Image: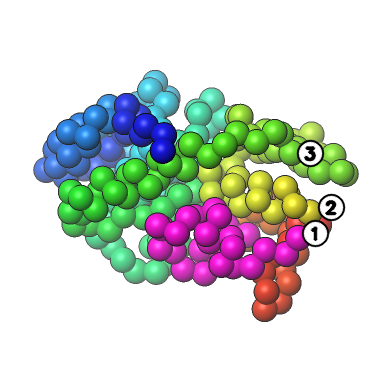
Amino acid sequence: MANLKGHTILLIDDEQDILEFLSYNLKKEGYKVYTASNGEEGVKIVQKISPSLILLDVMMPVLDGIETCQMIRKDLNITQPIIAFLTSRAEDYSQIAGFEAGADDYITKPVRPRLLISKVESLLRRLDKPIAEDIATPSTKIKIDRDRFLVEVNDIVLILPKKEFELLELLAGRPGKVFNREQILSIVWGNETIVGERTIDVHIRKLREKLGDSYIRTIKGVGYTFSE
């Protein structure tokens, strides 16, 4: 297993006691930790330090978590981190809004230290997947740059949230193969992450909005496939 310690983590939360609690427990495990008390400050820090992981509160002054996440995802100059929302709001609509903004995962407050560390390790393992060669579909309309997490569609460069990128990479890597929902959840999100099937639907819809409707087909009652 790859050594996860030493990764840089940015915590963005307007509650000082939460920042201190999270920072203490993460530093104790060997992570390099930065903190910000609002979204605007957090975006500026991201541009300077390029963190591996951001733990981001939803309800904050100045810029809330959704707006902050959207700003980070749209910045082509940022090496895109994993983003997980920290929130006490467990409503389904809040989670869907977060995924649509580009979040990779959710951590619900209050967080116990051992659960926090386990979740952070699980998230960071996603960075240690083997580097694949760039994928170019036979039509050459879509090119996937695995090193820079960029997608080129008809000569237009797109930057996708990490989970959208990995979902596209999975489907485009095997054109014509039908992946069922269980396979997608296991490969893209991993068995340690609990997400609902609606999460897949949201990510597929976002990919279609960016790529067009012709590439990803729904096989009713089965799953999804990439069409050349």
Q: Is residue 200 in the magenta section?
A: yes
Report, in whole angstroms, how far the alpha carbon at label 1 lies from the one at label 2. 8 Å
Q: Residue at position x 31%, y 54% from top? A: 107
Residue wearing tag 1: 176
Mark 1 nearby-residue class (10 Å; few <14, some 14–19, many ≥20): some
Horizontal and vertical percent position of residue 213: 76, 59
Q: Which residue occupies 60% across, 29% down?
A: 148
Residue indicated by mark 2 = 228
- Residue 221 seen in the current view: yes
Colour scheme of the picture? rainbow
* 193 over 139 or under it: above or below: below
Residue 214 against residue 197 in the figure, above or below: above
Find residue 192 and name its label.
Answer: none
Q: Nearer the viewer, residue 37 or 192?
A: 192
Question: Residue lying farthest right?
Answer: 139
Q: Residue at x 73, y 49 (%)?
A: 172
In the displayed structure, does residue 64 sit left or right of residue 127?
left
Q: Earlier in the sequence, mark 3 or mark 2?
A: 3
Residue type of the residue flagged with mark 3:
Ala
**For numbered disc 1, what is the local secondary structure?**
loop
Could you tell me residue 160's position as x and y percent? 59, 42
Whether residue 72 can be seen here: no
Q: Residue furthest top?
A: 48
Give the labeled residue for mark 3.
136
x%, y% of residue 66? 40, 49
What segment carries the magenta color? 177-204
Horizontal and vertical percent for residue 170? Answer: 65, 51
Q: Residue at x 41, y 34 (%)?
A: 2
Q: Residue furthest front?
A: 1
Instruction: State the separation of the CA atoms marked 3 and 2.
Output: 10 Å
Q: Is residue 92 above or below residue 184?
A: below
